[in-house]
Image (cartoon, rainbow, N blue to C red):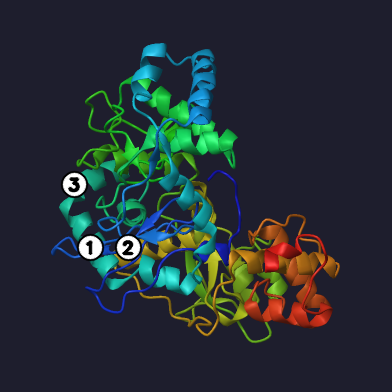
Amino acid sequence: MQLRILTVILCACVLGQSAAANAPDRSLRPVARPSFSGDLQLASAASTELVRPVLRPTANMAASPKPTLVAGNLGFQSWIEGFRARAQIAGIQPAVFDRAFQDIQYNTGVIQKDRNQSEFTKTIWDYLDSAASDARINNGKAALQKHQQKLEDIERRFGVEKEVIVAVWGLESAYGTYRGDTPVIEALATLAYDGRRGEFFETQLLAALEILQSGDTTTTNMTGSWAGAMGHTQFIPTSYLNFAVDFTGDGKRDIWSNDPSDALASTAAYLAKSGWKTGKPWGVEVILPNGFDYQEANREIIKSPSKWASLGVKATNGQPVPNSYGNGSILLPAGSQGAAFMIFSNFDAIEHYNTADAYVIGVGHLSDRISGGPKIQSDWPRGDRALTQKERLELQRRLTDVGFNTQKIDGKIGPLTINAVRDYQVTNSLTPDGYASLTLLKRLRKERGSSPSAVGTQDYN
């Protein structure tokens, strides 16, 4: 979560779209977190969804089968004994550890979700259709009205607009409807033992034990997603330790209960400490002029709105973007054929919460819509589809093969890959928008034949 990765295609990893105001919506969370199907109707009994973009499968919570728990897994039990010693060295009391690990078993359902998440991808427009669906907007307005006084108090204390807090809540747990019911200690222990990201999950597991030791909650109440995200706004344990607050004054930082006060205040504290600037936008949709130099659409190129206006970049109303918003850069999440945004420092603040561009735009746009703002005006290249994980790996390998080194072959379309794509486009007299599309991959295939270099060719099968 802490790493700053520009995801264009990866960020589109979640669910579909809502065709009507009361249609079921989908969940979006771009980082190893599970998603669920359905969308909350606060005024009705319809199902709800999470909206966090990142490679995750979707599953209907009510219909999902119970996870398989493997009893008698000697390797897992041996790992727990070793971890117990490490936890004690880290300051976890033996009694706290033993209570937390009572009846813990290796959970194969968690591993299956971790293995499958990268294959489930959606385009950014499908993601945003769900993130800012009519249902989610209406539910957000209802949640804002229901908790208005509480949210105004939080806004005054932390300086983060209440609509932004509600938007995070809406994307993370559909306004508290889907907080996750997986035992966090069991999930994190399973993932730490599994080893694929063992160091990360062991760190989270130690943090979760520290939370239990502090008395903020109990093992039974500490439930969340299969990857350990907890509560109304899905904090991972280390983020909880860094940012959670006791807003109600009861002596506990309770993000799990039906009362969302501590969770919403903790989210505001997180954004405030991440550099949120009160009264400033996350970004605004802009219109680029004919002949715009798409190499200027780069997060590292930052100009004042008046400077962008001198290059022909205007807001959708045809007026220059106000200089009072601060300096910004141009973001093209779907390349030259999609919407363009001028993004500001508050984009970076949301990005600390989740690094995927789709998530940040989703939170920002949903908050704008809850505030009464307009829909995104530009169209998207809806004839395109997102690249699969194997195709992203292939794209990176093929670019590297032809001299445009992406530095990493990891299936993540981050800044290094975007720069490689842009350099390839410049060399081949293509629009240099850095967009990693299926069309680009097909062009690369034709250039070098159907098979890339021998390195990792199994990834393309």
Is the Cβ of the residue at disc 1 closer than 8 Å to that at disc 2?
yes
Is the Cβ of the residue at disc 3 closer than 8 Å to that at disc 2?
no
For label 2, count other residues whose C-alpha is less than 10 Å away and answer few (under 14), some (14-19) or many (20+): many
Q: What residue type is labelled 2?
A: Ser
- Spatial CA span between label 1 and label 2: 8 Å
Compared across the picture, whether 294 is left or right of 77 comes to right
Q: Quadrant of the C terminus?
A: bottom right
Q: Is mark 1 on a helix, strand or loop?
A: strand
Among the two numbered marks 1 and 2 on one chain, the one whose residue lies closer to the N terminus: 2
Compared across the picture, whether 281 is left or right of 368 comes to right
For label 1, count other residues whose C-alpha is less than 10 Å away and answer few (under 14), some (14-19) or many (20+): many
Q: Is mark 3 on a helix, strand or loop?
A: helix
In the figure, residue 249 lies in which quadrant? Answer: top left
Report x, y in % for residue 176. Answer: 26, 50
Compared across the picture, whether 178 is left or right of 312 comes to left
For label 3, count other residues whose C-alpha is less than 10 Å away and answer few (under 14), some (14-19) or many (20+): few
320 vs 193, nearest the viewer: 193
- Spatial CA span between label 3 and label 1: 27 Å
Q: Which amino acid does label 1 sit on?
A: Ser
Badge count: 3
Report x, y in % for residue 76. Answer: 50, 30
Q: What residue type is labelled 3?
A: Gln
Q: Residue at x 60, y 50 (%)?
A: 4
- Spatial CA span between label 3 and label 2: 31 Å
The disc placed on residue 275 is none
Among the two numbered marks 3 and 2 on one chain, the one whose residue lies closer to the N terminus: 2
Per the image, the residue denoted by label 1 is 47
Per the image, the residue denoted by label 2 is 37
Among the two numbered marks 3 and 1 on one chain, the one whose residue lies closer to the N terminus: 1
Per the image, the residue denoted by label 3 is 149
In the figure, residue 185 lies in which quadrant? Answer: top left
Can residue 337 be seen here? The reply is yes
